[in-house]
Amino acid sequence: MAQDVSLNPFKRKRKRTEPFRPLKREVRLPVWGDVFIRLGVAFFLLGMVIMIHWWDRDGLVDNVDKHISFIDVVYFTMISVTTTGFGDIAPVSDRARMIEALIVTPVRIAVLFIFVGAAYDFVIKRSWEKWRMARIQEQLTDHVVVLGYGVSGSQSVGELIERGVDPRCIVVIDPSEDRLAEAEKLGVNVMAADATRDETLKAVRIDAAQTVLVSAGRDDTSILIVLTVRHLAPDVPISVVVRADDNELLARQAGANNVINPVRFTGLLLAGSVKGAHIADYLADLASVGGRVQLVERVVGPEECGKPITDLKSGGQGLRLYRNGRAIGFWEEECQTLQPGDVVVEIVPTAGNGAE
């Protein structure tokens, strides 16, 4: 799945002073490789202590036969590092005691951390994470699923959080571990997987989602994802990003409720800026929760029924009405009497700003 590289006209300006990011390459080490490395380091440290003890064996005393053999050195090293200490062999010289204090003690701590860390990583941590993820997946409902965390996907997640959506109610699926690491910093749920696979979407309970946002970076991949989602979740709203005009119809036929073409929208903004220097700025203001005003779509309330679209309870400016799947402009006669079930699109000032 390619990274989304579309131009986003609402993308916020980056800070001029960005931190230095060193060149990195992911190291994929299998579990058995990690285990062997840990064991190798532990045995190296033990071998080093055995050699030091053998070199300084004159500072040790065997209370049983008074003779220190190589087997005695190996035995003393193991019981010393493991803090067992039977007392049959003990350091008696000052140098031997300093070796135990300054060399063996740090090695003892290092070996302990190696084995405790290995037990935590391979047993406790993995078991805990598996249990915790299973509990999260079981409780997922009315959540937002973002399939693809490129430019558009990351912008949508950031905007959702700014609009008040709980990050714990957002699930991001992308094959890139690097992009998911950035998403995880926002507090959202992430999964490194292929969003075109049924088992991936079933794992995040796609059929119980509030909505699905698809931004795979390639039109063919995005349309395939839409087909898969629609197959598993017939009633869940789907929004998808496509770039080619002739793919918009295919996306709708695949089951998408909303098809967004960023290339076309960018062209509309550019054309609008020719006739007015502030048109593009105002449209960006409308689309982002960070602006002074924003577009809101909602169902009319009972107290608004029978009133005109110009007299909304929110105090916003009504623009369009959707009734039985038909779009009705604010200038049309039907907008003079709101009915139950009507969906209104209005402009409202954001919190802390006065009306436009």
Image: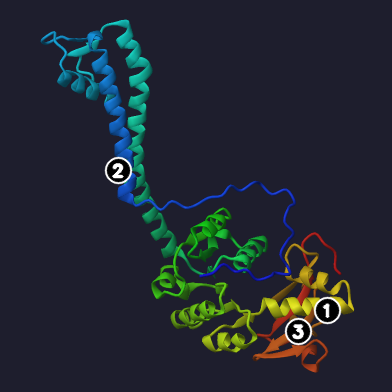
Q: Amino acid at mark 2?
A: Phe
Residue 214 lies, in percent from the top left, at 56, 74
| Residue at x-position 52% and y-position 64% | 172
Q: Amino acid at mark 3?
A: Arg
Whether tag 3 and tag 1 are in contact, CB under 8 A, the answer is no
Residue 348 quadrant: bottom right
Tell me: 164 left or right of 201.
Answer: right
Horizontal and vertical percent position of residue 22: 58, 47
Looking at the image, residue 121 sits to the left or right of residue 158; the answer is: left
Outermost residue on the left side: it is 65
Numbered disc in front, either 2 or 3: 2
Looking at the rendered structure, the secondary structure element under dot 2 is: helix
The image shows residue 266 at horizontal and vertical percentages of 74, 76
Label 1 crowd bin: few (<14), some (14–19), many (20+), radius 10 Å:
some
User: What residue is disc 1 on?
Assistant: 272
Tag on residue 220? none
The quadrant of the rendering that contains the C terminus is bottom right
Can residue 188 be seen in the rendering of this structure?
no
Q: Residue at x 82, y 81 (%)?
A: 310
Q: Choose the circle earlier in sequence order: 3 or 1.
A: 1
Q: Is residue 198 left or right of residue 272?
A: left
> Of all residues shown, which one is farthest toward the top?
93
Callout 1: SS: helix
Image height of 271 relative to 22, above or below: below
Alpha carbons under labels 3 and 1: distance apart: 21 Å
Mark 3 lies on residue: 320
Q: Residues within 10 Å of mark 2 (few under 14, many from 20)?
A: few
**Residue position marked by numbered label 2 in the rendering:** 36
Question: Is label 3 or label 1 in front?
Answer: 1
